[in-house]
């Protein structure tokens, strides 16, 4: 069934097309160009944002069965997310409590238990230490399991805090975004492919691109822009998060939609941006592209990891269509978005005392930078 929430966004998009304007703010917003290059500011962003707010670390469908796991590094924290025998998804530091070796080395997998490759200390799916060779040599080591991070699952997504013992109030953090994520039915998706791209000289430059509805018909005029109506977007500021609606050229036909989200996808698309670093493109039809921005070790490096999902397992005749969709997204990100953003990064050195401008028609970008500033001031 078509989500009433998304159908209402489609109607708003049609109204924006009819009046010839997108949703707008009251004023232009300025960000100093040096904010993208300042190592001290970047360090504050890591400490005051990435280490203090809930981060989306996986989708529920990534770990459908007990023993399924994924591992990743985020802001210098090696993470291990595991579905326990009790069905609960937990997040741990991917670190053996003996000498600090990494337990899981693969990004995805299934395990009955986790054994350290160094000395074979073994942990179960709930992170409990269950095996120590020659345990008598350690007496009472004072260690009963992996270091757990605050973690909860909501609306088909798994969130975690990167500091042990931090207070996680996920419902308050998500706010209205929780309802929108639930409407995407994330838990019903099937993972397909993952692609890693060196995204930009700074994580905020990459984030700016995902929130920008103004460039689609220009930068992407020969690719995904061929079906879009540029700069007629809807913008919903949902707490720290943003939802952006994009009108397609068939938006005027939305009254023909009765009960099928797949039909809605022909008329519009959506981006859900979960602050600070996750963009979900699509989800109202048969596929979703989830892009996670990983700040690198320094201010001038970041990586984007893109995960493609479909509403049904990709097999048989579905493979060719899925591959075609993946290649289009990959080409757009690599040859159009990344190439442009790297050029911006190179130019910022010559703009040290100048500002980056976000117009009244770019409220999502304005909101991102306002949220960053607010958290840095807390």
Image (spheres, rainbow, N blue to C red):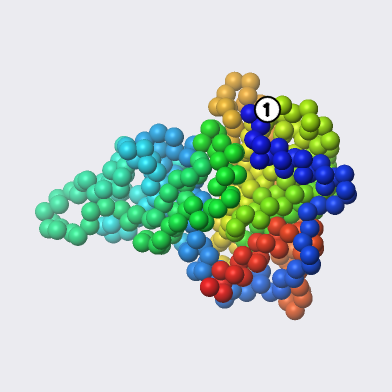
Query: Residue 127 vs residue 275: left or right?
Result: left
Which part of the image, by quadrant, shows the N terminus? top right
Left or right of residue 350: residue 65: left
Q: Residue at x 66, y 37 (%)?
A: 4
Q: Nearer the viewer, residue 105 or 25?
A: 25
Q: In the structure shown, which secondary structural element does the residue marked by tag 1 occupy?
A: loop
Above or below residue 145? Residue 44 is: below
Place of residue 300 in the rendered image (x, y in percent of width and height, measured from the top left) = 62, 66
Asked if residue 299 is positioned above or below residue 191 in the image, the reply reads: below
Is residue 314 visible in this depiction of the protein? yes
Q: Measuring 24% from the left and 49% from the top, which residue is drawn there?
A: 129
Q: Which residue is mark 1?
A: 260
* Front-most of residues 42 and 228: 228
What residue do we see at 72% from left, 33% from top?
Answer: 264
6 lies left or right of 213: left
Give the x, y percent position of residue 42: 58, 70
């Amino acid at each position: 069934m078509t989500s009433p929430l998304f159908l209402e966004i489609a109607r708003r998009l049609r109204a924006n097309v009819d009046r010839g304007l997108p949703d707008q703010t009251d004023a232009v917003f300025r960000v100093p160009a040096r904010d993208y290059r300042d190592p001290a500011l970047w360090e504050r962003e890591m400490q005051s944002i990435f280490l203090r707010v809930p981060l989306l670390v996986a989708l529920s469908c990534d770990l459908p069965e007990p023993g399924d796991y994924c591992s990743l590094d985020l802001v210098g924290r090696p993470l291990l997310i595991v579905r326990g025998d009790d069905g609960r998804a937990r997040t741990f530091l991917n670190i053996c409590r003996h000498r600090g070796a990494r337990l899981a080395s693969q990004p995805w997998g299934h395990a009955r238990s986790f054994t350290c490759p160094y000395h074979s200390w073994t942990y179960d799916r709930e992170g409990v230490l269950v095996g120590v060779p020659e345990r008598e040599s350690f007496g009472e080591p004072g260690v009963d399991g992996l270091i757990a991070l605050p973690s909860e699952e909501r609306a088909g997504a798994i969130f975690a805090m990167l500091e042990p013992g931090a207070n996680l109030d996920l419902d308050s953090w998500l706010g209205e975004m929780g309802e929108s994520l639930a409407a995407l039915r994330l838990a019903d998706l099937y993972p397909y492919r993952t692609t890693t791209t060196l995204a930009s000289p700074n994580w905020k430059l990459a984030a700016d691109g995902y929130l920008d509805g103004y460039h689609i018909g220009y930068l992407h005029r020969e690719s995904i822009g061929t079906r879009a109506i540029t700069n007629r977007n809807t913008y919903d500021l949902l707490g720290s998060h943003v939802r952006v609606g994009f009108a397609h050229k068939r938006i005027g036909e939305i009254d023909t939609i009765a009960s099928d989200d797949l039909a809605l996808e022909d008329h519009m698309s959506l981006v859900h941006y979960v602050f600070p670093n996750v963009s979900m493109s699509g989800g109202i039809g048969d596929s979703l592209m989830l892009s996670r921005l990983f700040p690198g070790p320094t201010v001038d490096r970041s990586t984007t990891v893109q995960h493609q999902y479909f509403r049904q397992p990709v097999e048989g005749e579905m493979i060719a269509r899925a591959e075609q969709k993946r290649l289009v997204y990959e080409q757009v990100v690599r040859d159009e978005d990344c190439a442009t953003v790297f050029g911006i990064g190179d130019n910022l050195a010559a703009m040290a005392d100048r500002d980056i401008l976000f117009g009244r028609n770019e409220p999502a970008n304005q909101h991102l930078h306002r949220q960053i500033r607010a958290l840095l001031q807390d």
